[in-house]
Image (spheres, rainbow, N blue to C red):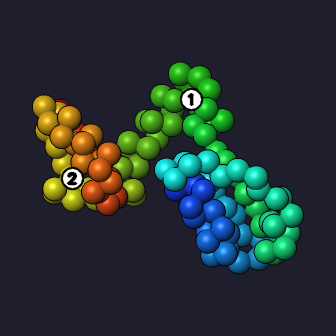
Amino acid sequence: MVYDSVGKDTWEASLDCLQRRGLMVSFGNASGPVTGVNLGILNQKGSLYATRPSLQGYITTREELTEASNELFSLIASGVIKVDVAENQRYALKDARRAHEVLESRATQGSSLLIP
């Protein structure tokens, strides 16, 4: 399985990482949208699967959002899901502008966190 948030510039290399019947999850366009894809390439590379998921395909009502959010935060609180955020990527809410500038400059790795 490959999760590709970059798009155009990494599409081919990402497909090459997959084994037979592997799954390509394309969820971003940082380098631009993937266009002109010949679906036959999925067969040639080993019967690959590709999907382009979006939150709107999974969460369509406020109730679903609340339920999914509660489940996620419960898993985080219980330690089942660990969230590691580097100290230099934690920002006080008053420094939100700086956090966005750093994100836009692509100088971050992993998650960034705004703290109220």
Say which amino acid is labelled 2: Gln
Can you tell which quarter of the image residue 7 is in? Answer: bottom right
**Residue 89 got which mark?**
2
Q: Is residue 94 visible?
A: yes
In the rendered image, the quadrant that contains the N terminus is bottom right
Q: Is residue 79 visible?
A: no
- Is the C-beta separation of discs 2 and 1 under 8 Å? no
Q: Look at 24% across and 48% down and name the residue there.
A: 102
- Image position, residue 44 (x, y; %): 84, 73
- Nearer-N-terminus badge (2/1): 1
Say which amino acid is labelled 1: Glu
**Residue 64 got which mark?**
1
Element type at mark 1? helix
Q: Is residue 95 above or below residue 75?
A: above
| Mark 1 surroundings: few (<14), some (14-19) or many (≥20) residues within 10 A | few
Q: How many marks?
A: 2
- Image position, residue 9 (x, y; %): 56, 61
Can you tell which quarter of the image residue 55 is in? Answer: top right
Element type at mark 2? helix
- Image position, residue 106 (x, y; %): 32, 54
**Residue 53 got which mark?**
none
- Image position, residue 87 (x, y; %): 16, 57
| Mark 2 surroundings: few (<14), some (14-19) or many (≥20) residues within 10 A | some
Q: Look at 76% across and 61% down and name the residue there.
A: 49
Q: Look at 20% across and 35% down and name the residue there.
A: 96
Q: Look at 63% across and 75% down and name the residue there.
A: 17
Image position of 51 (left or right of 74): right
Q: Is residue 43 above or below residue 70?
A: below
Instruction: Pick whichever, 112 or 81, lies toward us.
Output: 112
In the rendered image, the quadrant that contains the C terminus is top left
Instruction: Pick whichever, 26 or 92, lies toward us.
Output: 26
Residue sitting at the far top: 62
